[in-house]
Amino acid sequence: MKLPLPGDTRSVFKDNNVLFKTSNLGLLFNKYVNSWQNGWQMTEEDSKKFRQSVSDIKFSKEYIENVLKRQQMMINNLKDSGWHVEFFTAKTDSRLIIGLGGTSVIETGMTLHPLYGFPYLPGSGLKGLARGYAEIGVESKPSADELREVFGSEKKDAPAVNNIQGKVFFMDGLPATFPKLDLDIMNPHYGEYYRGGKPPADYLNPVPVTFLTVASEQPFLFAVFSRDKALSEKAKQWLTGGLTDLGAGGKTNVGYGYFKIDVTLQTQSQPGIAKVTKASPMDALLERVKQCRQPGDKHILQKVFDDAWKIEGLDRKELLGQIRLQLPDTMKKNDKIISFLKEKEKESGITN
């Protein structure tokens, strides 16, 4: 095995035990790949061994905690300056892969923080995901003016005088702890066809390719902020929908990249660090109910009930009563919402 480093640096890492103690995954993944053979050639088996070694590493939690502390300080400063910040925690419901097709010497890439090296979701991508979910319009499709207010002008080639900046800003999605990495595999059957050598046919041999992913059940922190409270809440709702219903990153059409909002977790602001703490299931559900502001938000209520019915020991009658108290008058008086709540009473076995 060879390392593409100056001789004096390479001598420090001649022992793999030293190499794989590197605390920064970005350096290890992009600079310290030691899978090269003579002639600077690398086989899939060589790169697979490297990925496997990387996935087995337990990275230090200390420096990611420092990043979260700085983010929390920034959030506190924004609040003190009159900004409205909406933040929440979501867990990966399936494996997550960001930047699979990115440039990498080991063929398959991964988006890592450019300075700290941990997997993360760039804010620009989260903004696009939220916009994609908003444009689908699950229950009520926002107007073009609403989209412009939140996300800004879409056309970059329009006259500058017609362009406007969005009023909502999206922070990077940061892992709450250093996420566990899993080694996964894809099995392209027609490699020679893709390389332009032969037509696709069953006689071609599949060539398995391994790649690194973020494992399921890994918590990430998300935040949006705006001067307009209603817009920041709307952006949070769309981002939540995008993460849970559309998925982030690559290969979402085969189940990768989906998140779930764990009703037993909430992000609590404390001096110095954003940390995940336990909340009562009832309180967590009611926090989500507060996002419902118009009849078109019925899908949020549906998801609340779907999650509530999975929680053992939850007082369903109390939940329904609290939901009726939390809902705004525009929803309480809507015929569809009234009918919907009556259906939920029947499902829960509650009779008047």
Image (cartoon, rainbow, N blue to C red):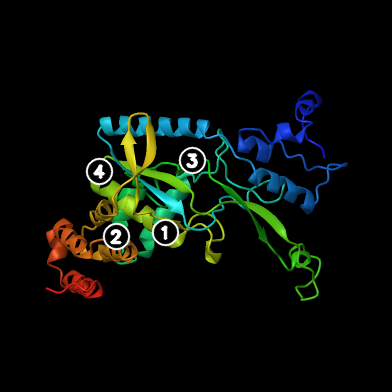
Disc 1, SS: helix
Q: Nearer the viewer, mark 1 or mark 4?
A: 1
Which callout, 3 or 2, points at the residue further toward the start of the chain? 2
Q: Is label 1 in contact with label 2 (beta carbons under 8 Å)?
A: no
Q: Residue furthest right?
A: 38
Percent across and percent down for residue 269 are 32, 36
Measure the C-alpha gap from mark 1 to mark 4: 25 Å
Residue 223 in the image: above or below residue 186 = above
Measure the C-alpha gap from mark 2 to mark 4: 17 Å
Q: Which mark is residue 228?
A: 4
Give the residue drawn at x 72%, y 47%: 106
Which callout, 1 or 4, points at the residue further toward the start of the chain? 4
Q: Which mark is residue 177?
A: 3
Which callout, 3 or 1, points at the residue further toward the start of the chain? 3
The residue type indicated by label 3 comes to Thr
Measure the C-alpha gap from mark 3 to mark 1: 20 Å
Give the residue drawn at x 51%, y 58%: 94
Percent across and percent down for residue 108 are 67, 51
- The answer to whether residue 81 is seen in the rendering is no
Measure the C-alpha gap from mark 4 to mark 3: 31 Å
> Callout 2: few (<14), some (14-19), or many (20+) C-alpha neighbours within 10 Å?
few
Residue matched to label 2:
143
> What quarter of the picture does the N terminus occupy?
top right
Q: Nearer the viewer, mark 4 or mark 3?
A: 3
Q: Which mark is residue 244?
A: 1
The residue type indicated by label 1 comes to Thr
The residue type indicated by label 2 comes to Ser
Which callout, 1 or 2, points at the residue further toward the start of the chain? 2
Percent across and percent down for residue 5 are 77, 31
Q: Is label 3 in contact with label 1 (beta carbons under 8 Å)?
A: no
